[in-house]
Image (tube, grey):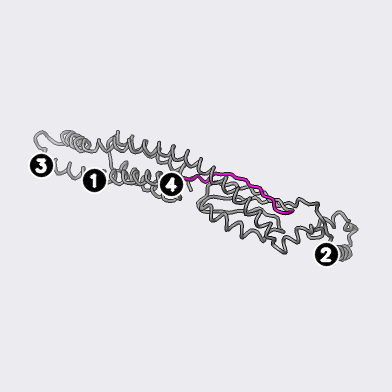
Amino acid sequence: MLQSMTGFGSGFSQKGGLSVTVEIRTVNHRFLDLHIRLSREYVFLESEIQHIVRNALSRGRVDVSVTIQSTAPAELLINADLARGYSEAARKLREELKLTDSLDLRTLLALPGVVQNKDSLAIAEGAQSELKQALTESLRASLSGVVQMRGREGQALKSDMMRHLTSISEKAAQARAMVPSTVQECHLRLQEKLEQLLPPKVLDPQRLAQEVAILAERSDISEEFARLESHIAQFGGLLADGAEIGKKLDFLLQEMQREVNTMLSKSGNLEITRLGIAIKADIEKLREQGQNVE
């Protein structure tokens, strides 16, 4: 199934005295750009989160927010040694700089590490299995929501992209049907110009035919149309297959754009030029949508 890179999901799990809530938001990005918001005391869980997310998603900017809370009343500990260290350092600095301010209790308690949650310390040190189990359950539930949303967005993208691809195919067929008549038009334009420049009965029909053949060869765009049609068919096949196709679609769009640019530079037919410009507009719309395909 075609997947978009835009999605959201959330999950919740509770084990023992802990509850874990995970929220994941994803948007488009060339590669997998993973960002995890996690409290410092639970940083040991980051590698587990990365492993699970990378197995589920391949592209996009992914923001993972993890909230871990204790369901039991918090038991706080005061790190007295650390508090004394802060106080002594403040005293020395005050004496050295001849300051009058002192370190009050409220400021001291707000300094990093002075007040600690006993449960958090136990979890961080022991990496309890219940916490990992709760994290895994909530993370997988959140990822499931993300994948489902990306799938729905992907189907909408696929429908719209197929519409533009059909438009390109129809315009290309119309333009290709005009190619044979452009040779005759070229013959007539060249003959008219030469008749205006040369005296009557001086124009050599054989030489005119040679010049027309050379000009027709230079302006022949049948090969470009053949390659464009091949790229259109491959693009449609990728949309039908789904899965991780974003980079392949981008490459094909570059090649389609290249072929149309060559056609416009070689063809002097106004109607083919008009259709070519319209095809470029459809390609640009496909490129905008393709940037959000996984």
> Between marks 3 and 1, how big is the CA–CA gap?
19 Å
Q: Residue at x 61, y 51 (%)?
A: 139
* Mark 1 or 4, closer to the camera: 4
The quadrant where residue 89 appears:
bottom right
Q: Which mark is residue 218?
A: 1
Gap between marks 1 and 2 measured at Cα: 83 Å
CA distance for labels 2 and 4? 57 Å
- Compared with 244, 275 (above or below) is above
210 relative position to 19: left or right: left
* Type of amino acid under label 1: Arg
Q: Is residue 97 visible?
A: no
Q: Are marks 3 and 1 in contact (CB under 8 Å)?
A: no
The residue lying toward the viewer, choosing from 207 and 175, is: 175
**Image coordinates for residue 138, horizontal then vertical, percent:** 63, 50
The residue identified by callout 4 is 242
Q: CA distance from mark 1 to mark 4?
A: 39 Å
Q: Is the C-beta separation of discs 1 and 2 under 8 Å?
A: no
Q: Earlier in the sequence, mark 3 or mark 1?
A: 3
Residue extent of the magenta highlight: 1-16
